[in-house]
Image (cartoon, helix red, strand yellow):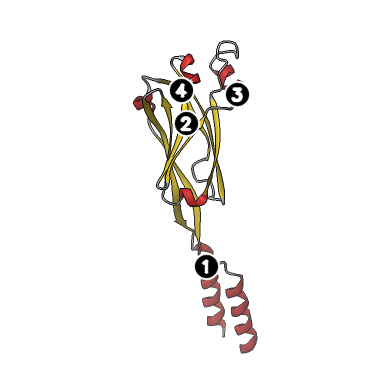
Amino acid sequence: AQQRAERYQLALRQMTPPISAAHCLEVIPQPLARTSTLLYRWHLDGPQQGQALDESVSVSGWIMPHERDRLSIARGYINTPSGRREFVLDHQRPDVLASLGLTSEQCPDPCGFRQTLTAALLLQGAEIGVMLGEHCLPLARIHEQVSQASPKPRKIWRRWLKRLQKLR
């Protein structure tokens, strides 16, 4: 009986998942009030708050300035500790135009973007923004957030082990 109880305890310990750190992303949008004089609206489609950090992360979204003709000169940027990457707005977003009551004839320039960042770039954080002429407007900050997994399953197994030991 003693050996069976010890084998059972060992089996329970092996089934208990270890407490590990879950790596996820924290996305902190900047308030529109800071950018409201130049930007009518903007949205960051991805990454989402709490999204799991993979080897690469897709950063996508769109902007719409008050003056639609400024889209032709708009450029996006991503600031990381290792440097600055600039990119053009090159994704047509008919869904955005429709939601704003515009047509592609009224706004022929693309307003969307999609960039891929490696997890290594996000370890210390990144700032995503847009440049309209000489104005740099930060839109959001993204960084890695490490949260501990809940230890509750381990506590449940420990209670069962204690009960089993009392039965001996």
CB atoms of marks 3 and 1 within 8 Å: no
Which numbered marker is on residue 76?
2
Q: Residue at x 59, y 27 (%)?
A: 91
Q: CA distance from mark 4 to mark 2?
A: 15 Å
In the picture of the structure, the residue carrying the numbered disc 1 is 154
Q: Of discs 3 and 4, which sits in the foreground?
A: 3
* Comes first in the chain, label 3 or label 1: 3
Q: Which residue, given by chain and number where applicable, does mark 3 sit on? A: 92
The vertical placement of 86 against 126, above or below, is above
Q: Position of residue 25 (x, y in %)?
A: 48, 47
In three-dimensional space, the C-alpha distance between marks 3 and 4, rounded to whole angstroms, equals 16 Å
Instruction: List x then y, in percent, for residue 11.
Output: 63, 76
Q: CA distance from mark 2 to mark 3?
A: 15 Å
Are dots 2 and 1 in contact, CB under 8 Å?
A: no
Q: Pointer 2: residues within 10 angstroms few (<14), some, or many (20+)?
A: many
Q: Nearer the viewer, residue 109 or 138?
A: 109
Question: Does 138 appear above or below 22?
Answer: above
What residue type is disc 1 on?
Arg
Q: Name the amino acid, label 3.
A: Gln
* Rendered position, 122 above or below 29: below
Describe the element under mark 1 as helix, strand or loop.
Answer: helix
CB contact under 8 Å: marks 1 and 4: no
Task: Check contact, mark 4 vs mark 2: CB within 8 A.
Answer: no
Q: Residues within 10 Å of mark 1 (few under 14, many from 20)?
A: some
Instruction: Determine which residue is flagged by label 4.
Output: 41
Mark sitting earlier along the chain (4/2): 4
- Within 10 Å of the Cα at label 4, are there few (<14), some (14-19), or many (20+) other Cα atoms? some
